[in-house]
Image (cartoon, rainbow, N blue to C red):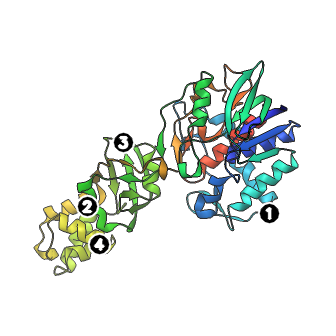
Amino acid sequence: MQTFDVVIVGAGAAGMMCAIQAGRRGRKVLIVDHAKTPGEKIRISGGGRCNFTNIHTGPQAFLSQNPRFCISALRRYTQKDFIAAVDARGIAWHEKTLGQLFCDDSAKQIIEMLVGDMADAGVELRLGVGVSSVTRDGAGFELRLSDGAQVACAALVVATGGKSIPKMGATGWGYDIARQFGLGVTETRPALVPLTFEVGLLDHWKPLAGIAVDAVVACGKTKFAEAMLFTHRGLSGPAILQISSYWREGQEIVISMAPGEDVFQRLKAAKQSNPRQGVHTALGALLPSRLAQLIADDAGARGNLADTPDAVLRRIDTAVNGWRVKPVGSEGYRTAEVTLGGVDTRDLNSTTLAANAVPGLYFIGEVVDVTGWLGGYNFQWAWSSGWAAGQAV
């Protein structure tokens, strides 16, 4: 049986960062993953260019039953620290929108950086190997791997992520290990995910599939101003993905599709200046034409502006900037970018990410009940939590 100081399960962003830090501290580190290649979520993120962090990262951008839990790790290893690592490797990057940073070239550059840093730190990487069982052995742990090998370690780090994108091999294994050792797991659900409509509502809006608008989408007191996309199943786009983390079944969302515009006054002015203009044509100055046509039809405005009462124009205003819609569900883990919820932070040390009641056991990254907004925040949590655990194992 081989013995290591640290075994990390999961060669994603958090796991590789932890391995690098532990290896640099002289620890004998093994990192295993059932995937054939490391960093699969890194590879596909950002359209293949990896939205690797966000310059606005802070606790305000994370959901958790304990919103303060993420503060320590985020402050000790910041977005500036990761940017410095990217710069040192000579990887060119750019800011896209809202503080989101992407590689100019390919997400593979980030993976190559991490894999190279692991090799330099003496980390052993085994791919295509899962973990069949984990048992406590005195002060440490014994793991039986799927290839039949057995390894022992003083510290075990679980960095297996959540349930999102199961076609990439995502499972709830990390939650099972947490429960095995007596840690709590909060409710988990798909997050950063498109929302779906019931059949009748879908039939009405489905002809608009593929149309996008800049929108403000709100659920309760939370709102996001980003692009929204009509789909064949409901709604998607960044604004919808963001609000999906806050939305729950049975709730409605409120959408403004011409934010900052007084639609009634715009139509009223058009009615004065060009009364023979069709309502949908005037509305098309603010919205894509097919969307404008559907909203005008729904309001009963099928004639010219001159023939349209102000009450109808006000209905249109409400339909555009106060659209209240109740999704029936989401597209689920199949397309969710992350999993909301996870290992209960009450059972973890916020400085080290260690289990309070199980010495030597650590949980980092997405498997923990810390979920970021869309836009590089979840990667920064992976870097920060992986770094923090890497200083402690």
Assess disc 3: are there few (<14), some (14-19) or many (≥20) residues with their C-alpha within 10 Å of its C-alpha.
few
Mark 1 falls on what kind of element?
Answer: loop
Label 1 vs label 2: CA separation?
50 Å
Q: Residue furthest front?
A: 148
Q: Is residue 179 visible?
A: yes
The residue singled out by tag 3 in the image is: 220
Q: Which quadrant of the view contains residue 321?
A: bottom left
The tag earlier along the polypeptide, 4 or 3, is 3
Mark 3 falls on what kind of element?
Answer: loop
102 sits to left or right of 223:
right
Q: Is residue 170 above or below residue 299?
A: above
Mark 4, mark 2: which one is toward the viewer? 2
The residue singled out by tag 4 in the image is: 290
The residue lying toward the viewer, choosing from 76 and 36, is: 36
Q: Give the residue drawn at x 68%, y 42%.
A: 10
Answer whether labels 3 and 1 touch (C-beta < 8 Å).
no
Q: Whole-percent x and y of residue 290?
A: 29, 72
Answer whether labels 4 and 3 touch (C-beta < 8 Å).
no
Q: Which quadrant of the view contains residue 344?
A: top right
121 sits to left or right of 187:
right
Q: Amino acid at mark 3?
A: Gly
Q: Give the residue drawn at x 71%, y 52%.
A: 38
Q: Amino acid at mark 4?
A: Arg
Q: Whole-percent x and y of residue 213?
A: 39, 65
Mark 3, mark 1: which one is toward the viewer? 1
The tag earlier along the polypeptide, 3 or 1, is 1
The residue lying toward the viewer, choosing from 309 and 373, is: 373
The tag earlier along the polypeptide, 4 or 2, is 2
Mark 4 falls on what kind of element?
Answer: helix
